[in-house]
């Protein structure tokens, strides 16, 4: 917290000192660049942190500017102008949130479509602002906008703009260090994994876009009195593209990066415009060079104190076990003539099996038998063409992110983690799922949560105690264990494990087997394991299902399956030595 306050006060001091050094006109120009920088910080949050690129940020900048301009022209110095000016931030924020919610809701990894939609919106907004003469002033724009509170745009207004920029940077940094920021970064790393941990990523992305809309509106609110004129160009694609260029040049993964990018390119442009006819070419070459050789922008070189620093390990807060899981035990699962088909390809063919009680079940069969596909149909990754899936006697018709709340957790065939998140963040995300309230994702104390299950797993797998390490530094086997631990922390009722020991050493495999057996017995879970390692199958399985060509070939205990002639004809398993 001391570092956070000192950093932002230091930046504010620098910005407040500059007018003395650069004079009134340059202060006026710098104020304009800082307004653009406020909007560019929103681009950096969406693009650099959450992982989707907005190409229409100018829409919300222009909307804020028009609302501010109209309010100041209508009420000037009157008190009524204050609530109206707040709409210059609120309306863009709500508009951006609504657009994000409509685009992202129920869809994963929709970033490219979102970028194209926002690009179209910027074009539409420009046409609307150009043609709606009675509201926007048409092509000539909205003119005659008075100063804000008597603040001179060549002097005193600059200090208010500088304060708002520091406020935007401080607020963004605080959000990114909060649990909400952790989830935003997790989306950019591995959105499908976050969905299966119980999070509505569409809602999270809409919140990020709404926040970026608020920042753009804030910049637009001060643009109107600063320039005294609002034109349709503010809503158009050119400004939207410039915000992206500035953010890329400065560094999209840093919060100070967009600020440095706006100021640098802005100053370069203002100097070149009057002395070099092809100044746009030089700016374009700068952008291309940064994209090719400096993917993290200039901030990737200088590493300004704008990124996230390691969170200090604070005293932990114990949370109770999920009583519903402990009391009710595992889930019953019924596949009744389940078929899945994509085009003419039949993936599952009237697959039927019934798991009535808690325990450890193994699903085996040759490659292509439909084992992983059965998990995919259950978790909504593949379409259910025919038949029914029932959980505890009720048809399963839920969005993917709601499966976790029902008590279903899944480990994927290949380690599905968040490479650039710390181990602490990996262990926290499933702990928060379905337990934390919405407002708690803004509470930094959520980072201190610790459950009994988590404490036990940290003892069993000591490498997880190095909580500031990035997951990208782990070996393949450690990544497998990390993902398994994440599914166990969620305290599920039905645990789906797809080859949990693939790539593990015999010693690691033995450790995982013991962990699965212990967790299952202690919590009375239903565990379904897809596995080719027959050693693990023999040691863990209470009941086996053998799949072949998308259907159930046989079921029974290990001895019964070993003696089944049909199974012998189509399947041969291996084991670790």
Image: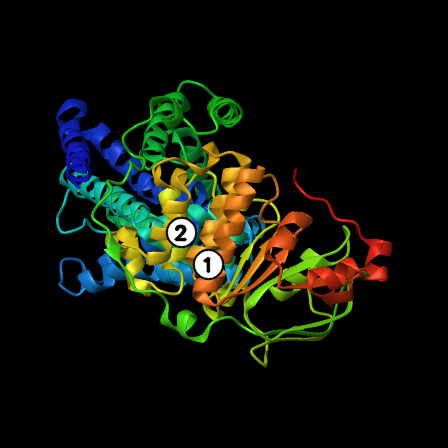
Mark earlier in primary sequence (1, 2): 2
Q: Residue placed at 13% from the left, 63% from the top? A: 79
**Residue 329 visible in this rendered orientation of the protein:** yes
- 266 lies left or right of 417: left
Q: Is residue 470 above or below residue 177?
A: above
Residue 223: x %, y % from top left: 29, 46
> Furthest residue to the bottom?
393
Q: Secondary structure at mark 1?
A: helix
The answer for how far apart the CA atoms under marks 1 and 2 are is: 27 Å
Query: In the image, what residue occupies the spot 46% across and 56% down?
Result: 488
Can residue 344 be seen in this snapshot?
no
Provide the secondary structure element on which disc 2 rests: helix
Residue at 43% from the left image edge and 63% from the top image edge: 522
Q: Residue 519 shows which numbered tag?
A: 1
Q: Where residue 170 appears, x then y in whole percent? A: 24, 43
Circle 1 or circle 2, nearest the eye: 1
Q: Is residue 501 left or right of residue 279?
A: right
Q: Nearer the viewer, residue 12 or 561?
A: 561
Residue 385: x and y, percent? 73, 70
Spot occupied by residue 4 in the image (x, y as percentages of width and height): 20, 39
Residue 183 is tagged as 2
């Amino acid at each position: 917290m001391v570092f956070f306050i000192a950093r932002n006060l230091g930046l504010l001091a620098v910005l407040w000192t500059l007018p003395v050094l650069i004079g009134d006109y340059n202060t006026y120009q710098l104020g304009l660049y800082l307004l653009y920088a406020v909007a560019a910080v929103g681009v950096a949050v969406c693009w650099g942190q959450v992982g989707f690129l907005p190409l229409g940020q100018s829409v919300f900048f222009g909307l804020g500017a028009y609302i501010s301009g109209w309010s100041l022209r209508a009420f000037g110095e009157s008190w009524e102008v204050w609530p109206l000016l707040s709409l210059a931030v609120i309306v863009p924020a709500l508009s951006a949130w609504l657009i994000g919610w409509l685009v992202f809701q129920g869809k994963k990894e929709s970033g490219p479509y979102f970028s194209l939609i926002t690009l179209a919106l910027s074009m539409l907004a420009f046409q609307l602002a150009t043609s709606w003469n009675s509201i926007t002033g048409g092509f000539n724009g909205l003119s005659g906008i008075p100063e804000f509170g008597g603040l001179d745009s060549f002097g005193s207004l600059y200090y208010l703009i500088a304060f708002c920029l520091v406020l935007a940077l401080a607020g963004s940094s605080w959000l990114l260090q909060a649990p909400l920021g952790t989830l935003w970064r997790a989306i950019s790393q591995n959105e499908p994994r976050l969905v299966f941990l119980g999070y509505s990523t569409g809602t999270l992305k809409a919140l990020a876009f709404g926040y970026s809309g608020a920042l753009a509106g804030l910049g637009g609110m001060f643009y109107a009195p600063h320039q005294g004129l609002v034109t349709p160009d503010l809503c158009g694609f050119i400004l939207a593209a410039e915000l992206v260029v500035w953010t890329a040049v400065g560094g999209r993964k840093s919060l100070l990066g967009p600020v440095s990018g706006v100021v640098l390119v802005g100053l370069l442009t203002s100097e070149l415009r009057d002395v070099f006819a092809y100044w746009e070419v030089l700016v374009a070459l700068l952008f291309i060079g940064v994209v090719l050789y400096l993917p993290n922008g200039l901030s990737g070189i200088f590493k300004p104190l704008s990124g996230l620093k390691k969170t200090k390990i604070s005293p932990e807060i114990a949370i109770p076990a999920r009583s519903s899981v402990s009391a009710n035990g595992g889930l019953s699962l019924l596949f009744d003539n389940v078929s899945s088909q994509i085009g003419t390809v039949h993936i599952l063919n009237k697959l039927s099996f019934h798991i009535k009680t808690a325990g450890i079940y193994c699903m085996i069969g040759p490659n292509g038998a439909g084992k992983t596909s059965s998990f995919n149909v259950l978790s909504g990754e593949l379409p259910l063409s025919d038949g029914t899936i029932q959980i505890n006697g009720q048809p399963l018709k839920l969005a993917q992110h709601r499966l976790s709340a029902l008590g279903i957790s899944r480990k994927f065939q290949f380690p599905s983690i968040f490479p650039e998140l710390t181990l602490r963040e990996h262990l926290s995300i499933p702990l928060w799922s379905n337990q934390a309230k919405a407002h708690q994702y803004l509470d930094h104390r959520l980072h201190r949560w610790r459950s009994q299950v988590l404490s036990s797993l940290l003892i069993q797998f000591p490498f997880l105690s190095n909580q500031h390490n990035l997951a990208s530094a782990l070996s393949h086997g450690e990544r497998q264990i990390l993902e398994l631990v994440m599914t166990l922390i969620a305290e599920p009722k039905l645990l789906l494990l797809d080859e949990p020991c693939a790539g593990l050493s015999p010693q690691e495999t033995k450790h995982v087997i013991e962990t699965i057996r212990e967790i299952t017995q202690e919590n009375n879970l239903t565990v379904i394991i897809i596995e080719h390692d027959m050693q693990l199958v023999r040691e863990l399985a209470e009941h086996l299902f053998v799949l072949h060509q998308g259907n159930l070939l046989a079921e029974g205990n290990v001895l019964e399956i070993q003696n089944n002639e049909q199974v012998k004809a189509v399947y041969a398993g291996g084991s670790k030595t």
